[in-house]
């Protein structure tokens, strides 16, 4: 902590107080995005979305405000990817994500501690998320969106998870795990559809970058759930002011 105070805010946020394991897995996740782009280099925007998403959630796992800067980059890029893929639930959610980034920046600047709900409240939040998913499925199916049962998870459950994330409630990561699993399946199916010629909507590179991103975010969400439960994310993960 003393070492962190010797540097400016940017340095503290980006480079201080990292575990060796964290550095290794962040490097692997970013490398995965670059490898996907080199294999199918048809979507530079998709690659930017992937790298930005990894950095956003990794710094979010550390409880650091800088995550919202990377989040803004990721959301803007992902909005484009979702639009060309006709993933309307994802597109709507990404618009909300863009708006939520400055709100999150402001909120995290006024409260450095993480929070947790009582068991009964937590149960009702998860029940509410399930009901919202079912309603979203019906709405997106009516709009002829692709795979609405998965896209609804990304749309409505993500809204709840993002709200809890902005308010620094630990339960956000449990919901993100559900969202990330659904998204891995969603983008994998869209990728297979392009490969077998079942659809011409979207691009192979963009879809593959999202598969890699969601797999990375799933791993990060599982690890972040542990980090936030231990209190390590309090006070910006030891990054100082």
Image (tube, helix red, strand yellow):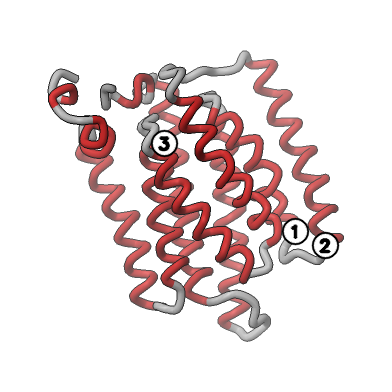
The secondary element bearing badge 1 is classed as helix
Quadrant (top left/top right/bottom left/bottom right) for the N terminus = top left
Sequence-wise, the earlier of marks 2 and 1 is 2
Residue shown at the point (72%, 36%) measured from the top left: 129
Residue shown at the point (46%, 48%) measured from the top left: 217
Sequence-wise, the earlier of marks 3 and 1 is 3
Quadrant position of residue 9: top left
The secondary element bearing badge 2 is classed as loop
| Horizontal side of residue 35 vs 5, given as left or right | right
In the image, which disc is placed on residue 61? Answer: none
Distance (Cα) linking label 3 and label 1: 28 Å
Crowd around label 3: few <14 · some 14–19 · many ≥20 (10 Å)? many
Marks 2/1 in contact by CB < 8 Å: the verdict is: yes
Task: State the image coordinates of residue 3 (x, y, percent, origin top left).
Answer: 13, 24
Crowd around label 2: few <14 · some 14–19 · many ≥20 (10 Å)? few
| Horizontal side of residue 206 vs 48, given as left or right | right
In the image, which disc is placed on residue 60? Answer: 3
Crowd around label 1: few <14 · some 14–19 · many ≥20 (10 Å)? many
Above or below, 73 against 146 in this view is above
Question: What residue is pinned by disc 2?
Answer: 143
The secondary element bearing badge 3 is classed as helix
Residue shown at the point (70%, 27%) measured from the top left: 125
Distance (Cα) linking label 2 and label 3: 33 Å
Quadrant position of residue 230: top left
Distance (Cα) linking label 2 and label 1: 9 Å
Task: State the image coordinates of residue 98 (x, y, percent, origin top left).
Answer: 56, 47
Question: What residue is pinned by disc 1?
Answer: 148
Task: State the image coordinates of residue 71 (x, y, percent, origin top left).
Answer: 46, 46
């Amino acid at each position: 902590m003393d070492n962190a105070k010797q540097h400016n805010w940017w340095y503290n946020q980006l480079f201080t107080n990292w575990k060796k394991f964290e550095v290794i897995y962040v490097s692997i996740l970013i490398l995965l995005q670059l490898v996907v782009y080199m294999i199918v280099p048809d979507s530079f925007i998709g690659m930017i979305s992937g790298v930005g998403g990894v950095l956003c959630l990794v710094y979010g796992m550390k409880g650091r405000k800088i995550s919202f800067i990377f989040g803004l980059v990721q959301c803007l890029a992902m909005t484009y990817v979702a639009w060309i893929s006709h993933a309307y639930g994802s597109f709507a959610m990404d618009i909300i994500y863009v708006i939520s980034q400055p709100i999150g920046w402001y909120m995290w600047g006024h409260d450095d501690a993480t929070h947790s709900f009582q068991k009964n409240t937590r149960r009702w939040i998860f029940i509410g998320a399930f009901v919202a998913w079912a309603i979203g499925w019906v709405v997106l199916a009516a709009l002829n969106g692709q795979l609405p049962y998965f896209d609804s998870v990304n749309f409505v459950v993500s809204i709840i998870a993002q709200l809890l994330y902005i308010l620094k409630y630990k339960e956000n990561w449990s919901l993100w795990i559900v969202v990330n699993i659904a998204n891995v399946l969603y983008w994998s199916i869209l990728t297979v559809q392009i490969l077998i010629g079942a659809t011409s909507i979207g691009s192979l590179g963009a879809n593959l970058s999202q598969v890699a991103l969601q797999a990375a975010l799933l791993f990060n969400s599982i690890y972040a759930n542990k980090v936030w439960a231990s209190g390590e994310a309090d006070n910006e993960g030891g990054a100082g002011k």
